[in-house]
Image (cartoon, rainbow, N blue to C red):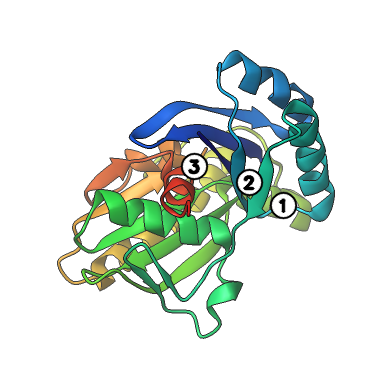
Amino acid sequence: MLLCLDAGNSRLKWGIAHTTGWYAQGALEWRRLAELGAVLAAAGATPRAALLASVVDAKREAALQDILARHSPALTLTRLSATAAAAGVKNGYARPETLGVDRWCALIGARQLEPRPCLVVMAGTATTIDSLDAAGNFVGGLILPGLDMMQTALAKGTARLSQAAGAYADFPRDTADAIVSGCQEAHIGAIERAFHRLPNAACCFLSGGAAPQLESLLKIPVRHAQGLVLEGVRVLAP
């Protein structure tokens, strides 16, 4: 069995994979990282190898490795990075290794599910919008501040705009609603413009904590897919 790890800015997602698919999956907020050993033990499996897709700092990675070593001393941990090509996906970056490994794994995960052109959107702490053509070429992508980050930036950068809770409206009539609606409209516009740049695009894969806020507003075919990064990690197993 293989332990697949997606170390994101907000949470650590994990999955235990075997030769035919997934045995178990879950997620932990970083403040609960100490519980990981018990969570894996409760899953009833003892993987001998682990693959890590990480966008976090060295301190968090070291804490993760320490917990894994105490849980399973024989476990070997391999840190993944983006490459020029893998699993039917070709990396369009001039320097392939500089593409975020989470984006790379999500593209690979999406390619396993959809052979036609598609957009891969991960709406989390940051929002990434990446394009795959029919041949599996990653042709480029966008990075935006996530919804929460956008709203926080407005609150911090202006004297009279607070981060009060608001709701989406076509024509907002108070400031809180105007902020929420503006941030969501910015995301919707970026996603839909990127989708329409792909000829005969099949669908938009949408994942991340902010996905529910965006899904109902999008006027394009949307497929909810929370485990794309983990799926890509699993596919990249040697």
Q: CA distance from mark 3 to mark 1?
A: 16 Å
Can you give x and y, in whole percent of width and height, for residue 176 in the image? Answer: 59, 39
Q: Under tag 3, what secondary structure?
A: loop
Mark closest to the chain's N terminus, 2 or 1: 2
Q: CA distance from mark 2 to mark 1?
A: 6 Å
**Category of crowding for the residue at label 3, using alpha-carbon neighbours closer than 10 angstroms: few (below 14), some (14–19), many (at least 20):** some
Q: Is residue 184 above or below residue 141?
A: above
Disc sitting over residue 208 in the figure = 3
Mark closest to the chain's N terminus, 2 or 3: 2
**Category of crowding for the residue at label 1, using alpha-carbon neighbours closer than 10 angstroms: few (below 14), some (14–19), many (at least 20):** some
Marks 2,1: beta carbons within 8 A = yes
Mark in the foreground, 3 or 1: 1
Marks 3,1: beta carbons within 8 A = no
Query: Which amino acid type is shown beneath numbered disc 2?
Result: Gly
**Category of crowding for the residue at label 2, using alpha-carbon neighbours closer than 10 angstroms: few (below 14), some (14–19), many (at least 20):** some
Q: Is residue 143 above or below residue 92?
A: above
Residue at the image position 24 percent from the left and 67 percent from the top: 196
Query: Which amino acid type is shown beneath numbered disc 3?
Result: Gly
Can you give x and y, in whole percent of width and height, for residue 181 in the image? Answer: 47, 46
Can you give x and y, in whole percent of width and height, for residue 149 in the image? Answer: 65, 50
